[in-house]
Amino acid sequence: MVPSILPTYNRAPLHFVRGTGCWIEEADGRRFLDLGAGIAVNALGHAHPALVKALTEQASALWHVSNLYQIDKQQALADRLVDLTFADTCFFTNSGTEAAELAIKMARKYWHAKGAPERVKILTFEGAFHGRSSAAIAAAGSAKMTDGFAPLLPGFVNLPFGDHDAFAETMKDPEVGAVLIEPIQGEGGIRTLPDTCLKGIRDLCDTTGALLILDEVQCGMGRTGKLFAHEWAGIEPDIMMVAKGIGGGFPIGAVLATEAAASGMTAGSHGSTYGGNPLGCAVALAVLDIVAEPAFLDDVARRAGQFRQGLEGLVASHPEVFEEVRGEGLMLGLRCRLPNTDVVAAGYAEEVLTVPAAENVIRLLPALNISEEEISEALARLDRIAHRAAAAAAA
Ligand SMILES: *Cc1c(COP(=O)(O)O)cnc(C)c1O
């Protein structure tokens, strides 16, 4: 008999009931150190007072009106994001997947409006993840996500990761209208695209006019120590997808775009009943107030340095368990020699939450305001996890 929840997830037998900062409490009273942050979502940890305040104040005033009316908090959030980024305009969604949908639609509409409707092809990269809608799985192209869901939305060309020659060759195709890429792949195993690659991609997009769409759903919102990961490469996209951290745990996403890239999106061309609702926007404004502060981002970079150094030591002292450290800022991964799911399970036994990813990686995506002491505690527990996993493998 099918369980009452559709069994598309393999869930751990853990029932969390409350959390504060980087700590989350199981129903049986155990306190776990949360290095997953709900998959890079709880950017400021659990129950951050400023976020609780923003949410509860808005909850007692107004929840929802629809986009048939002006929503002042949505306007304020859009103005703030436009101020802080390359973008001239924003559309708010409820998730990263919905942001991917709009980004793809926007690129196609752009070329249609420009009188070049043949430029429908969008280049994507092996190992990518852009969500689970029909368009997003077609974009990522992996068999694991697409199997059984044919016919897939056509027009995506999936290229090897980090192979600039293959990319340059494909860009010669006059039907290519856009390139869609994560500056750091999350689900794909914390794979960083080198800055020089991102710059090379930007240059070729400039040459052919193709739009550069960055998926910063996981790597954005301060996670790398800059507000958005592409800032490290000194380039700007034409369109960017944001979600996860921007709501600090409240479901909200966004597509940010330049005026030119958004030029096809006229009244009636897209919509969302809930997108940009007062609750989500109130919380996202509170998140931005904290995360966009330069001093906060400097702290993220400092903590990241501490964490990374400790992780390098951990890999050196447990070569039978760990192979390498990956990632940037507080978007870190440990490539494992033992099955990554066994290492995640050893983490549960040591009361630590980590998140598996492709390429046998475990992800470490803590709240961005994790303290120096908590990172030391994380490293101590990861050392115990390594001992435990190695002992279990030897048994
Ligand atoms: C999580 C994720 C998405 C999808 O976001 P949802 O909110 O789960 O729909 C898209 N792109 C990237 C890079 C992600 O990490």
Image: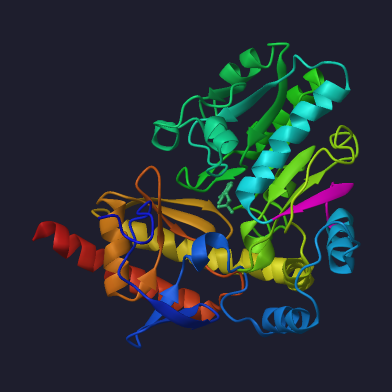
Given residues 113 and 196, the one toward you in this image is 113
Q: Is residue 201 above or below residue 67?
A: above
| Residue 48: % across, % down | 63, 81
Given residues 320 and 107, the one toward you in this image is 107
| Residue 145: % across, % down | 44, 37
Identify the image quadrant of residue 235. top right
- Queried whether the magenta region covers residue 90, the answer comes back as yes
Identify the image quadrant of residue 136. top right
The answer to whether residue 235 shows anywhere in this view is no
Task: Tell me the colour scheme of the image.
Answer: rainbow
Q: Residue at x 43, y 76 (%)?
A: 33
| Residue 17: % across, % down | 44, 82
Given residues 190 and 263, the one toward you in this image is 263
Looking at the rendering, the stretch of residues picked out in magenta corresponds to 84-93
Q: Residue at x 73, y 44 (%)?
A: 240
Identify the residue at the far left of this view. 395
Identify the image quadrant of residue 47. bottom right
- Queried whether the magenta region covers residue 87, the answer comes back as yes
Q: Is residue 19 left or right of residue 64?
A: left
Q: Is residue 38 left or right of residue 16?
A: right
